[in-house]
């Protein structure tokens, strides 16, 4: 009896497995031609999503959009690139991730694809700082991506409050602090400053312009980390001072919270990205329509330079639709399509879009954005950036939450970064 | 009868386990080396993560067990509306953990959240109440979310245990004039021990691996204040792609949780045997 029962169970399991297997097989055979595009879930991804839908409508090629929040996007892309499964045909990536992807040969080189279409490469309408990010090594190497979202930091400040207290637009961080103090003490429900200080990408992205303005550098000429230099300590101490005038809980703020405070009018100044500008003047989202001005990143010991943070479009090596993906890439980054995406709020990466009269009328921030891009500098182009950013970010966060003093935090961060470099020669 | 099931289980769990073991004993080029474990022993951050995991487990367990037991004892009687109370109490446990994380992140928000907002409306100054953003308050804030969500689990299992106890000893005790505390100490608690063992063990195994709430609420921050072992392993595996090191860390975590579980089983199992014999 027992043998027959167990035999029956075996047969049932086998039948189930066969059924499941055949269903799985069916799915794979029926895969339709089309493109799978990995997009960032946030303002930066909105324009690409809309462009993908336009592409599908115009050319009849199915575009499947996979939308993921920042950290998940990175992880999913990394897994796909390393395993070469071809889950994505086009990926949208933040430029700090680029060095890692390109270094390990996981992205399709674009120049051969250009040449196959009879073109030497991307046209000169692309802004040089944006295109430089797409080459590995930086600026000189082969091309692996095209720039889509022309993000470069700007200094957002409430010009109405500046006029009220008769303050000139700040050109140094010292002037910023002075203005922050005056506005904080003068206004009841307004914090002078707000910043992203959540550990990791958030705090490092906001700290770098300050770090650079005080004359600090992450690495010296020999590639050794120097984040514990006197200039760096001065920069961090300044950040802690600004933190005193920031809303409570700023230590875990990310882009959403910073923009919420700016849009609600409860914070007067911040470093922010152009992708947020449309929301500022949108009466359905903002209480400070027309009151925010966009300036350049202030300097201090050295002239201020914005941190560039473009989002790039690339084709994973493992994609099974490389030619189609490249067609989409060319189409999406063409001047005609970039104008349409700019009208939807996407910061441009082409000269002609910035020079366009219609767009200049719509976006009062365009001159500032262009100046910021031309004067920007990228974060260190190392494949180890993710680990380094993480370590640096943890210690910056500890300093901001009061757990460690500035000197201690930076000295530990420096040691940690040196360890990371040692582990990965 | 069990052979097909066992074979499937072995295939799905044994192969990945052996693969991970191999990962932990090699480096990224495939060379056999103990360097991952050497690094682990020198890794101060992992040590901190382990300590925080231990604190999290202990505090959450004590709070959840205490509250769960109290609620189970209270609702073990013939109260009016008992069924409704039970249904409401079960709700937090039915929500997906990610949803719970998002809800509580909003509740804890120092500027716009429910807690600070409500107290501010009563005129209390909440500027120092940082909850998830505060260096000292982050860990306990995250623990409280776990307690909110999983106390019903303890409550459910303990209630089931209580309801399976025989009534005769209780009747006898009441006739002898025993107090409520004496009844609990001498009748309820000894008989409940097998259930307690199961409940505590199940919960510890989950708490030691805690990940989703913390990932949503603080991602390990501020600084390193809410970093736990699982989060640290995840970061090494999927952000830095150090799969070998992450495998070594995972095995260390496995070894530690197995040790704790075995110790617990022995400890409570002994008491159960004593109670029976």
Image (cartoon, rainbow, N blue to C red):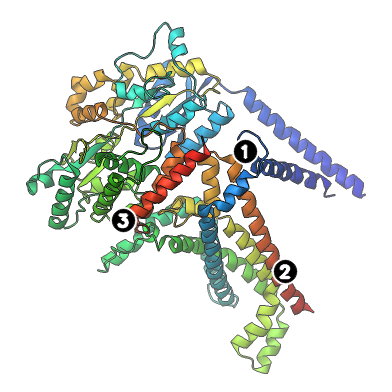
Disc number placed over residue B27 in the picture, else none: 1
Q: Nearer the viewer, residue B40 or A151?
A: B40
Using the rendered image of the protein, determine whether residue A61 is visible from the camera's viewpoint.
Answer: yes
Q: Nearer the viewer, residue A412 or A273?
A: A412
Marks 3 and 2, how far apart in space?
48 Å
A418 vs A363: above or below: below
Q: Nearer the viewer, residue A162 or B227?
A: B227
Q: Position of residue A115 (x, y in %)?
A: 44, 8
Please tell me whether mark 1 or mark 2 is closer to you in this view: 1
Of pointers 3 and 2, the one earlier in the residue sequence: 3
Label 3, secondary structure: give it: loop
Q: Quadrant of residue B22?
A: top right
Query: Residue at label 3?
Result: B112
Q: How many marks?
A: 3
What residue occupies the far bottom of the structure in this picture? Answer: B176
Image quarter where the C terminus of chain B lies is: bottom right
Classify residue B38 as left or right of residue A334.
Answer: right
Please tell me whether mark 3 or mark 2 is closer to you in this view: 2
Label 2, secondary structure: give it: helix
- Disc 3: which chain? B
Query: Residue at label 2?
Result: B266
Q: Position of residue A157 (x, y in %)?
A: 18, 43
Label 1, secondary structure: give it: loop
- Disc 2: which chain? B
């Amino acid at each position: 009896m027992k043998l027959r029962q167990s035999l029956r169970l075996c047969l049932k399991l086998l039948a189930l497995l066969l059924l499941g297997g055949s269903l799985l097989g069916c799915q794979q055979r029926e895969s339709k031609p089309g493109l799978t595009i990995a997009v960032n879930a946030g303002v930066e991804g909105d324009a690409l999503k809309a462009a993908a839908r336009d592409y599908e409508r115009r050319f009849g090629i199915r575009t499947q959009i996979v939308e993921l929040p920042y950290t998940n996007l990175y992880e999913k892309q990394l897994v796909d690139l390393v395993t070469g499964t071809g889950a994505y045909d086009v990926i949208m990536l933040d430029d700090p991730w680029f060095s890692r992807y390109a270094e390990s040969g996981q992205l399709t080189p674009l120049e051969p694809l250009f040449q196959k279409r009879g073109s030497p490469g991307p046209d000169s309408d692309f802004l040089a700082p944006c295109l430089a990010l797409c080459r590995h090594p930086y600026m000189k190497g082969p091309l692996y991506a095209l720039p889509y979202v022309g993000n470069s930091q700007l200094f957002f400040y409430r010009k109405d409050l500046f006029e009220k207290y008769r303050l000139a637009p700040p050109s140094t961080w010292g002037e910023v602090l002075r203005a922050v103090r005056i506005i904080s003490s003068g206004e009841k429900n307004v914090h002078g400053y707000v910043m992203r200080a959540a550990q990791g990408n958030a705090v490092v992205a906001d700290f770098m312009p300050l770090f650079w303005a005080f004359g600090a550098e992450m690495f010296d000429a020999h590639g050794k980390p120097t984040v514990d230099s006197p200039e760096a300590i001065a920069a961090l101490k300044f950040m802690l001072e600004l933190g005193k005038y920031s809303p409570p809980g700023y230590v875990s703020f990310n882009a959403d919270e910073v923009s919420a405070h700016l849009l609600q009018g409860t914070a007067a100044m911040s470093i922010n990205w152009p992708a947020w500008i449309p929301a500022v003047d949108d009466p359905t989202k903002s209480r400070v329509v027309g009151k925010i001005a966009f300036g350049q990143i202030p300097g201090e010991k050295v002239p201020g330079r914005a941190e560039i943070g473009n989002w790039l479009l690339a084709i994973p090596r493992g994609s099974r639709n490389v030619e189609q993906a490249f067609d989409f890439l060319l189409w999406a980054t063409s001047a005609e399509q970039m104008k349409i995406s700019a009208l939807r709020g996407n910061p441009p990466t082409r000269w002609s879009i910035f020079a366009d009269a219609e767009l200049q009328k719509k976006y009062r921030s365009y001159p500032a954005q262009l100046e910021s891009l031309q004067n920007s500098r990228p974060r260190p182009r190392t494949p180890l950036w993710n680990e380094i950013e993480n370590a640096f970010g943890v210690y910056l966060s500890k300093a901001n939450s009061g757990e460690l003093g500035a000197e201690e935090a930076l000295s530990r961060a420096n040691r940690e970064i040196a360890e990371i470099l040692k582990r990965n020669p | 009868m069990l052979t097909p099931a066992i074979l499937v289980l072995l295939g799905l769990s044994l192969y990945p386990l052996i693969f991970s073991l191999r990962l932990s004993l090699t480096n990224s080029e495939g060379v056999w080396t103990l360097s991952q474990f050497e690094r682990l022993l020198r890794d101060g951050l992992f040590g901190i993560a382990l300590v925080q995991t231990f604190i999290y487990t202990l505090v959450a367990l004590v709070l959840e067990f205490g509250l769960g037991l109290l609620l189970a004892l209270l609702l073990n009687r013939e109260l009016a509306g008992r069924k409704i109370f039970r249904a409401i109490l079960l709700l937090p446990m039915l929500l997906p953990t990610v949803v719970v994380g998002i809800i509580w992140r909003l509740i804890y928000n120092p500027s716009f959240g429910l807690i600070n907002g409500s107290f501010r409306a009563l005129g209390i100054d909440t500027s120092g109440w940082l909850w998830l953003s505060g260096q000292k308050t982050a860990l306990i804030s995250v623990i409280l979310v776990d307690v909110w969500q999983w106390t019903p689990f303890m409550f459910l299992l303990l209630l089931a245990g209580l309801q399976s106890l025989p009534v005769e000893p209780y009747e006898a005790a009441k006739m002898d004039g025993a107090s409520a505390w004496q009844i609990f100490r001498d009748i309820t608690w000894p008989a409940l021990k097998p259930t307690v063992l199961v409940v505590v063990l199940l919960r510890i195994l989950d708490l030691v691996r805690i990940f989703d709430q913390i990932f949503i609420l603080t991602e390990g921050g501020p600084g390193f204040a809410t970093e736990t072992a699982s989060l640290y392993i995840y970061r090494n595996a999927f952000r830095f792609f150090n799969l070998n090191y992450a495998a070594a860390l995972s095995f260390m975590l496995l070894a530690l949780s197995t040790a704790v579980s075995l110790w617990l089983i022995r400890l409570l199992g002994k008491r159960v045997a004593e109670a029976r014999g």
